[in-house]
Amino acid sequence: MNTWLYAIPSVILVSLISLIGVFTLALGQDKLKKVTFILVSFAVGGLLGGAFVHLIPEAFEELGINLLSALYIVIGMLIFFILEKFIRWRHCHIPTSAEHVHPIVTMNLIGDGVHNFLDGLMIGASYIVGIPVGIATTLAVVLHEIPQEIGDFGILIHGGFTVKKALIFNLLSALTAVLGTVISLVVGPHVHGYTSVLLPITAGGFLYIASADLIPELQRDVQVSKSLLQFALIVAGIGIMALLVLIE
Ligand SMILES: [Zn+2]
């Protein structure tokens, strides 16, 4: 029961992040860039910390340090590689207008929905292992979802959605996370080895998002001062994840 008490509020919090885009409307393009830069750096640290400080050691503990655990991590990376293909499917040449919703918008919503569903599954599976692991996974998800959802909101607006419509659809695609968590909490305890498969896959997913999705974004800045700040923020993100271990 305790697991539910933590997992459900965690995943609701994650879903509500989908509404964050509306707050960025007031920010100018320049300010938004600065904020995103900080959020993305911090998210990289959170994801790497989540994977290397919490999930991988936990998976090794459950499965042992062996080929199988390592393969699950790679499978997690591949799953997110495929998912990204859908989200980034942008080869559309139809001009945007109010009446015509860009096909990329639909792809983005579906891809995002599946991604959020997996985030939800992972949060649920982590809480089954223990409250601290659950909190670590939730934090890693929250950190990468903030810049991601800001970006998704921008895509929907750019794709011809009104603000209200963008918010509603973004929230709907985020609510799949709640479904994912509920499925994990219901199914997980009855399926032998559920968490020992889900945990390393989650780690792989986090590694993929950090290194293939977010870090290339940061590499576009070559200024020394900015790069140092990025580095410091990444280390801070990992540090926060490490602090969670101390609390355990
Ligand atoms: Zn996510």
Image: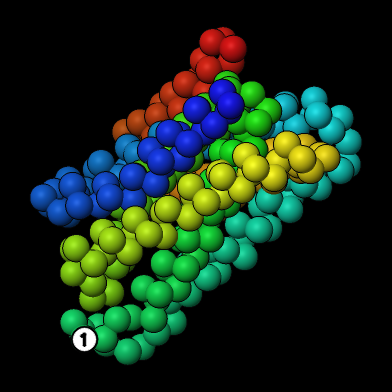
Q: Position of residue 171 (x, y in %)?
A: 34, 56
| Circle 1: residue type | Glu
Q: Is residue 129 above or below residue 112?
A: above
Residue at 53% in and 60% down: 114
Q: Give the quarter of the figure containing the C terminus.
A: top right
What residue lies at 47% left-to-right and 68% top-to-bottom?
110
Query: Residue at the spot x=18%, y=47% of the render?
Result: 23
- Which sits in the foreground, 147 or 182? 182
At a point 38% along the width and 59% down the height, the residue shown is 172
Can residue 41 be seen by looking at this rendering?
A: no
Quarter of the figure with residue 59: top right
x, y (%) of residue 97?
20, 84
Query: Ligand 1 within 8 A of label 1's CB?
Result: no
Q: Which residue is mark 1?
A: 99
| Way the structure is coloured | rainbow
Decide if residue 82 is in sight here. yes
- Circle 1 SS class: loop
Q: Is residue 138 above or below residue 156?
A: above
From the viewer's perspective, tell me whether residue 66 is left or right of residue 159. right
Tell me if residue 182 comes above or below residue 225 in the rendering: below
Work out which quarter of the rendered image holds the N terminus and state it: top right
Hey, which residue is sitting farthest front in the picture?
Answer: 1
Query: Badge 1, how many Cα within 10 Å: few under 14, some, many 20+?
Result: few
